[in-house]
Image (cartoon, rainbow, N blue to C red):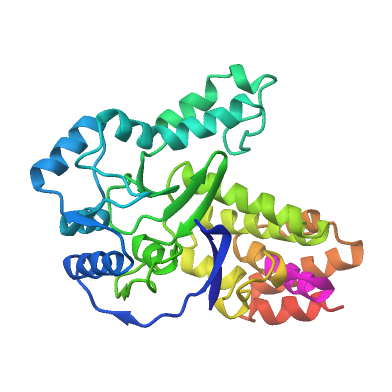
Amino acid sequence: MTTTIASATGPTKTTPLVTPRVCFSFAAYAKAVVAHLRASGVPIAPGLSHDEFAAVESAYGFEFPPDIRSVLREGLPVGPGFPNWRSASRQQLRLLLGLPAAAILREVSAGDFWPTSWAPRPENPSSSSDAREFLRRAPTLVPIYRQFYIPASPCLAGNPVFYVRGGDVKLAGLDLADFFRRERPRGWAAGAPVPAWAATSARRVDFWTDLAEEAAWRERERICSPWEARVEQLLQEARQRLKEAGWAEEEVAEMIAPASDAPAVGDSPCSEIRGEGGVLRHVKLLSLALLRGGWSAGEVVESMGWTTKRAAAVEAGHKSISASKRPESKWLFSELKK
């Protein structure tokens, strides 16, 4: 399986996801990352001490998550693009920590940025205090390298890495290990080994995940046909409804986006629903997921804009599902082919 993720050397970088994993502890993995950076020509200073960590965290009001803390304890990267947590002035570090929010506020003031996840867009976004309040409540982003950041909250290992440049927010790594495996600025060595505990999906982080998902959706709208974009929107709504109904992430992924159907590297975000056949297949999956998630047949019909004949088929099938153990997918696929 493969994916496309933001990179410092271009808008996107495609990298295989299947990589041999090595069983590492945090300490052993930190040694591997530092060795990888050193082999890439990045100057490495002695790692931060307990007192140095405490001083930084006290001064700026956040805690380093365990995985990035382990790396910085093993060795402190001090090359271009890396924050120098030991020698940089307080003003420099405060500027780095505040840069994502400041850049977003600048986009808002220019009238070019207002995520739908915030609230209805005000008539004059530049004079609105809402944006500042949303950003004030957002988890602090800890700079890793250039425009790449890891959230300080939740203070757990495995937070995703985000690329943030102005209003452009993208997922840049499922976690720190995934980021260091993928990220290869010019001159860097091949990616660091992947530990056994590396994330296989990105943890949701308040505020930042919403922005990254909305940016990805805008990209889909730019590339995809109206039909493909609409189906993708319905799939996203179905995922949310299923989660609200109590289905686990793994169950939702299995119902709506099986791993075997994932698009290949370099494909358009809509490649998995490209063409009439792809749209029909995803409409089938979507309908099944909605029914299993508790939607009534009438709600499914209304969301799809189906004809009376197709609506009757869905209604009959819905009753059949409720009254028997017959697999929903077999019935739904046969009905939707009509």
Residue 248 seen by the camera: no
Q: In this view, does 57 lie to the left or right of 338?
A: left
Residue 202 seen by the camera: yes
Residue 130, horizontal then vertical, whole percent: 53, 23
Q: Nearer the viewer, residue 150 or 147?
A: 147
131 vs 142: above or below: above
215 vs 24: above or below: above
60 vs 202: above or below: above
Residue 200, horizontal then vertical, whole percent: 42, 69
Q: Is residue 200 left or right of residue 329?
A: left
Q: Residue at x 47, y 69 (%)?
A: 250
Q: Which of 99 and 272 is in front in this view?
A: 99
Q: Quadrant of residue 108?
A: top right
Q: Does the magenta stretch include residue 277?
A: yes
Residue 100, horizontal then vertical, whole percent: 46, 37
Q: Is residue 1 magenta?
A: no
193 vs 159: above or below: below
Q: Residue at x 63, y 74 (%)?
A: 263
Q: Which of 131 and 265 is in front in this view?
A: 265
Q: Is residue 34 left or right of residue 238?
A: left
Q: Residue at x 57, y 34 (%)?
A: 118
Residue 311, horizontal then vertical, whole percent: 84, 63
Specify the segment rendered in magenta. 273-287
Q: Nearer the viewer, residue 179 or 320?
A: 179
Q: Is residue 307 left or right of residue 334?
A: right
| Residue lying farthest to the top in this orientation | 127
Main SS of residues in magenta: helix
Quarter of the rendering occupied by the C terminus = bottom right
